[in-house]
Amino acid sequence: MGVSPSFPSPPRILVRGVNWLGDAVMTTPALLRLREKFPDSHIALLAPEKLSELWQNHPAVNEVISFSSGEGIFAVAKKLRARKFETALVLPNSPRSALEVFLAGIPERIGYARPWRNFFLTRTIATRTDAVKMHKRTVEEINQLIAQKPETRSRRPEIPKSAHQSYEYLHLAAALDANPEPLPPRLFVMVEEVEVIGKKFGLERSAGPIFGLNPGAEYGPAKRWPVEKFIAAAKEIQQRTNCTWILFGGKSDAAITAQIQSALGNGAAVHNLAGKTSLRELMALMNLCRVFLTNDTGPMHVAAALGVPVVAIFGSTSPELTGPLSSGDLHHSILTSDAPCSPCFLRECPIDFRCMNGIEASRVIQRVVETVKL
C-alpha cells in the first residue's frame, strides 16, 4: 500500500465507474458521500457511453467522461491525462480499470487489492470483512440441497445488511475520508423531461394509474419469472386497478413484451416500449409509474433510485446482496420462493426452475395491489 500524496484543496477527483446499469446505480451512495466530503471539488466520472445518460443532473458529478465499447486503454488514458486529475478512485475490480488511471499519470490511484492490478494502484484496499462472495452452485451441490428433507436441512446463514453491493463502493469512498454510512441510491430526472418524454410516447394522460412491468433480465433465463405468470398477474392487476401498463425492456426483450402485449390486448392501456427508448427516456417514463413490477435487473435499480416503489421477483440471485434498497417512506417488496438451492447465481437453471416456478401469480398480484394502496 502506497502513501497518499498531498494535494492542494479542493482536489480534482476522477471516479472510474462500473460497467453495468444496476451496479452503476448502486455506486450512487458512494458518489453522494464523496460530494458531501468534497463539496467544492471537481468530481468527474469515467463511464461507458451506454450509461452516460444515467448521470445527467446528478449533483455528485460535475463531468461525465464516456468511452465506447471499442475504445482502447491508451485512448481512454489520453483523455484522462489532459484533465490533470490528482486522485482516482477505481470502483471496478478489473485490471483494465486500474491500468487506465495508471497510464493517465494520475498521482493517487485507489482501488481494491486484486491480482494483476495492484502494481497500477498507489493505495490498495483490502476486501471488506462483511463482504459476501457470490458462489455459483454446481449441479452436484444443487442436487444435494434439494435431496435433503426439510426437517434435516440446515438453515441458511444470515447475511448482514452491510453485505449489500452498495457497501463495497462506500468502503472505497471512505479511503478518501468520506462517510461510509449508507444512503439510498439516488438518480434525478427533471419534471420538464418527464412531461416532454411522456408526451412523446402518448403517456401524458391516462384513464387510470400507470404501472411499469419489466419481464426481462440480461444476465440469463434463471433470473426471469415465467412469462405466463407475468401475463396472469398483469391481467388480474389491470382488472382490479384499471391501470395502464408500460412494458419496459431492451431490444432482446421485444419478443417477451410482444407476447404480454398480445395477451393483455393491444389497446391504449398497454404501451410496449421494449427497445424503443433511450436510457434517459426510460428514466423519465419510470417516473410516471406508481409501481414497477420486475425481475432482478438494472432497470429495477433505476426505478428504486428514482423513488418508484418496486415489486421485485428474485430466484437465482440474492436480494440481500443486490436487492433494491428501501428508505424512509419508500418501501420495496421482494418476492422469493423457499427453494433450498436458491440463490445459485447461475445463468440457467440445471434442474426444474423451482425457485421461480414456486412464486405464484397470486402473491405478486397481492403485493402490487398492496403497494399502490400504501
Image (spheres, rainbow, N blue to C red):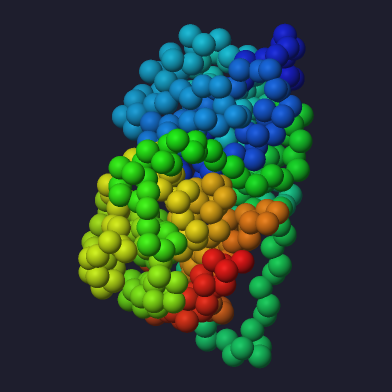
Q: How many numbered marks appear?
A: 0
Residue 296: image location, x then y, percent: 48, 60
Is residue 357 positioned above or below 285 on the image? below
Residue 213 appears in the picture as rendered: no
Is residue 159 positioned above or below 338 on the image? above
Q: For the point 71% across and 57% down, which residue is it?
A: 161
The front one of 36 and 194 is 194
Image quarter (top left, top right, bottom left or bottom right) of the C terminus: bottom right
Residue 267 appears in the picture as rendered: yes
The front one of 167 and 145 is 167
Quarter residue 176 falls in: top right
Is residue 279 positioned above or below 352 on the image? above
The front one of 1 and 256 is 256
- Answer left or right for 93 relative to 223: right
- Answer left or right for 89 relative to 45: right
- Answer left or right for 255 relative to 327: left
Residue 16: image location, x then y, percent: 53, 29
Residue 30: image location, x then y, percent: 65, 37
Residue 46: image location, x then y, percent: 49, 26
Image quarter (top left, top right, bottom left or bottom right) of the N terminus: top right
Q: For the point 24% across and 70% down, which residue is it?
A: 265
The front one of 259 and 285 is 285
Quarter residue 40 falls in: top right
Q: For the point 51% across and 41% down, which residue is it?
A: 24
Q: For the point 68% across and 29% down, which residue is it?
A: 34
